[in-house]
Image (cartoon, rainbow, N blue to C red):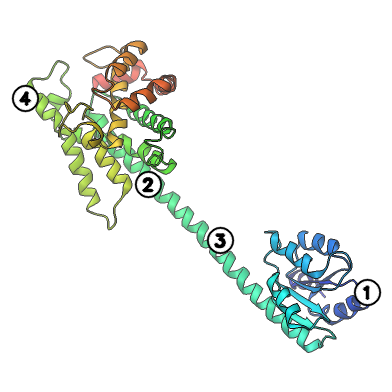
Amino acid sequence: MSTLDFVSKPTVLIVDDTAENLTVMNALLKDTYRTKIANTGERALKIAAAEPRPDLILLDIMMPGMDGYEICRRLKADAATAGMPVIFLTAKTEVEDEQKGFDVGAVDYITKPISPPIVMARVKTQLTLKAAADFLRDKNAYLQTEVEKRTREVQVVQDVTIMAMASLAETRDNETGNHIRRTQNYVRALAKQLQKHPKFAALLTDEMVEMLYKSAPLHDIGKVGIPDAILLKPGKLTPEEFEIMKSHTVLGRDAIAAAEKLIDAPSTFLRLAREIAHYHQEKWDGSGYPDRLAGESIPVAARLMAVADVYDALISRRVYKPPFPRDKAVAIIREGRDKHFDPVMVDAFLAIEDEFHQIAERFADSEEDVQAKARA
């Protein structure tokens, strides 16, 4: 017998406390299968748990100490051995005995004295079934791996596309690319803090927080439709110019809504992106734009974005203003409680303001960033 034949053959573990029975069964099976033997329950469990594991177990019921029923129970209770088919070999012939064997997890029941052809046929049948089950399990595992791989690839493409779209707005605005990174990290930090609040815990699942993080960069996508003379004006806008500037919220909504129409099923990600783009300039007291929504009629995603966007505008340098000191920015957010912002979100912001500050420092604009943007 070659080494390859020995390794590729299915392994049958024979468990019996009688040496004569072990000898007979081993002699019957050894030319067709790789065999292992055990004369106690403890030894059988040890062999079953060791690599390479048996493909099938022939198990005597009536043994001193741990009987076959208990051995089978323990095998089925262990995830590593639960899939091994067990065939009981026993002199017990009562229907109740057979039923008990099946109840503890056996797949077949052969009575002694054995018939060699019956033993060989039933062993072959169970090994064939196990091989088929193993193939399907391995195939399913492979397919699952491939699905996960393709999903990751699609996710990467989606993430890159989002950042590319967000950059369209950023390249035409006074803000640097780090504004996108800061605001999306603020949104995630604030949402995670609000997971602890009973009002938001059910909505802000980990999956939802991640989608908010990824959709936040699209909040100003509508600015691609605002004329440069208004978008880049260093001074105060006239009332007429400000009305045009305000339209970036509707332009952003319409662009994302058009994308939603191209897919067959609703997309939570695109819905969040649309809500953020459309409503992030609304205020809690109803004085915002474009629809003068108030209170909880403003989507949660937009309320989160409002805090993040205003905070970042306050601490950042613009062509029309220097950056505000940290304490002044925090004070302005606090003063906006119940006016500009959801009061619960302001409380959450104040609780993690230090984390906001750390995000701002991690993605701070360099002087070169600001100057390059000004020249652009």
Picture residue at 32% right of the left edge, 35% below the top: 216
Q: Which residue is mark 4?
A: 240
Residue type highlighted by circle 3: Ala
Please state which of residues 192 and 320 is positioned toward the viewer in this rendering: 192
Q: Which residue is mark 1?
A: 19
Residue type highlighted by circle 2: Val
Marks 1 and 3, how far apart in space?
41 Å
Picture residue at 29% right of the left edge, 21% below the top: 337
Residue type highlighted by circle 1: Ala
Q: Which residue is mark 3?
A: 141
Residue type highlighted by circle 4: Glu
Picture residue at 29% right of the left edge, 53% below the top: 266
Q: Does dot 4 land on a helix, a strand or a loop? A: helix
| Image quadrant assignment for residue 51 | bottom right
Q: Position of residue 160 (x, y in %)?
A: 36, 42
Q: Which residue is mark 2?
A: 157
Which one is closest to the eye, mark 2 or mark 3? 3
* Residue at the extreme left of the image, as rendered: 240
| Image quadrant assignment for residue 120 | bottom right
Marks 1 and 4, how far apart in space?
100 Å
Of the residues under marks 2 and 3, which one precedes in the sequence? 3
Please state which of residues 136 and 118 is positioned toward the viewer in this rendering: 118
Which one is closest to the eye, mark 1 or mark 2? 1
